[in-house]
Amino acid sequence: MDQHTVLQHRCAPSVRQAGWTLGEMMIALALMAILAALAMPSYNSQQRQARRADARQALQQVQLEQARWRGQHDQHAEQLSSLGWTSDRSALGHYQIAIEEASSQGYTLKATPMGTQGQDTACNPMRLQLVDSAILVLSSGADPQTDAAKCWRP
């Protein structure tokens, strides 16, 4: 080889360049979109389940405050404001809390999901009921007799 050929060989541009072609990029994006579409329903379900803790905590807080209130009054409080609540929202704002009924023997508390949590139809609403000053009933869904284990378990 002569010197001129060696110089041309060293200086010649590389034919192969690093990177992705448009077709490869489109295939990768399509695969990511399919994976995201499969994962999102499961993720949203887990988020709704995790947010139920907000309702459980709020209802249990009202339950404790009702016990304190009843120790000093003839019957349970009929309004959240009587228990010192300044808002009818749960701590994280995913539920609206209400006292549905109250008497000297018991009360019914209800947590209704709000916003994106409103899509949690299986546990809409969540209820905590004290009956005859001794029996605690946890329920959820439109039918108060529905098994509430899935909504009330952490």
Image (spheres, rainbow, N blue to C red):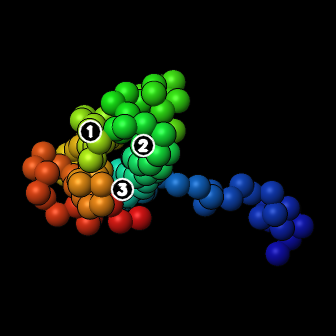
- From the viewer's side, name the closer residue of 49 and 89: 89
Instruction: Mark 2 or mark 3: name the one nearer the start of the chain.
Output: 3
Q: In the rendered view, does 33 fall on the left or right side of 123?
A: right
- Tell me what residue is drawn at x 27 percent, y 37 percent: 102
- Tell me what residue is drawn at x 58 percent, y 55 percent: 19
Question: Residue at label 1?
Answer: 103
Image coords of residue 18 (percent x, y): 62, 58
Above or below, comparing residue 69 to residue 20 in the picture: above
User: In the image, what residue type sits under mark 3?
Assistant: Gln
Above or below, comparing residue 100 to residue 152 in the picture: above
Quadrant assignment for the N terminus: bottom right
Q: Could you say which disc has been placed on residue 49 in the image?
A: 3
- From the viewer's side, name the closer residue of 8 and 115: 115
Q: Could you say which disc has been placed on residue 70 in the image?
A: 2
Label 3, label 1: how far apart the Cα atoms are: 32 Å
Outermost residue to the bottom: 1
Crowd rating for badge 1 (residues with CA inside 10 Å; few <14, some 14–19, many 20+): some
Image coords of residue 107 (percent x, y): 28, 43
Crowd rating for badge 2 (residues with CA inside 10 Å; few <14, some 14–19, many 20+): some
